[in-house]
Image (tube, helix red, strand yellow):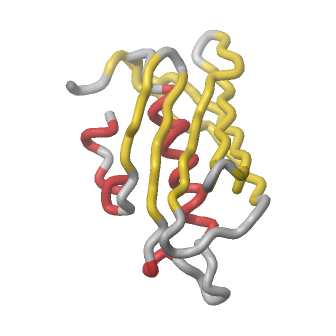
Amino acid sequence: MFERDTASKSAGIELLDAGNGQATVRMTVTGDMVNGHAMTHGGYVFMLADTAFACACNSHGPVTVAAGADISFLRATAPGDVLIAYAKERAARGRSGIYDVTVTCDGDVVAEFRGRSRTIGPAGPA
């Protein structure tokens, strides 16, 4: 699934690991990713967390999408910072799942994200 994710790749997001309901992704903040306060735009932090979430919930095989998500931002980052997002399945029942994603920079927590997933079909294209 990540191989076909042109949106995440255009932001420079790299998949480090995925499997068994977990995933880790990394992104280096560029100057094009900052807001009017010279800090990383929250949309990019959300995108990084959402990508980790997508990789984790699709690691089981069937096509799975977001049913909803929310994020809490804890500290700002800036160009040159390397952000890492770690997603982990917390609960799954039937076609629904709950995933938590922690975004860090140099070991400090930048944001916490919770995603709710829904399986919609069999495994996607290879």
Residue at (48% x, 71% y) in the render: 80
Residue at (70% x, 17% y) in the render: 91
In this image, 21 relative to 8: left or right?
right
Residue at (54% x, 55% y) in the render: 83
Residue at (50% x, 31% y) in the render: 23
x and y, in percent, of residue 94 in the image? 62, 10
- Up-down relation of residue 76 to residue 112 (above or below): below
x and y, in percent, of residue 12 in the image? 36, 59
Compare residues 105 and 87 and report the one nearer the observer.
105
x and y, in percent, of residue 70 in the image? 72, 49
How many numbered callouts? 0
x and y, in percent, of residue 79 in the image? 51, 75
In this image, 102 relative to 50: left or right?
right
In this image, 118 relative to 58: left or right?
right
Which quadrant of the figure contains the N terminus? Answer: top left
Residue furthest to the top in view is 94
Residue furthest to the bottom in view is 36
- Up-down relation of residue 79 to residue 60 (above or below): below
- Up-down relation of residue 83 to residue 16 (above or below): below
Residue furthest to the left in view is 126
Picture quadrant of residue 36: bottom right
Which quadrant of the figure contains the C terminus? Answer: top left
Compare residues 99 and 93 and report the one nearer the observer.
99
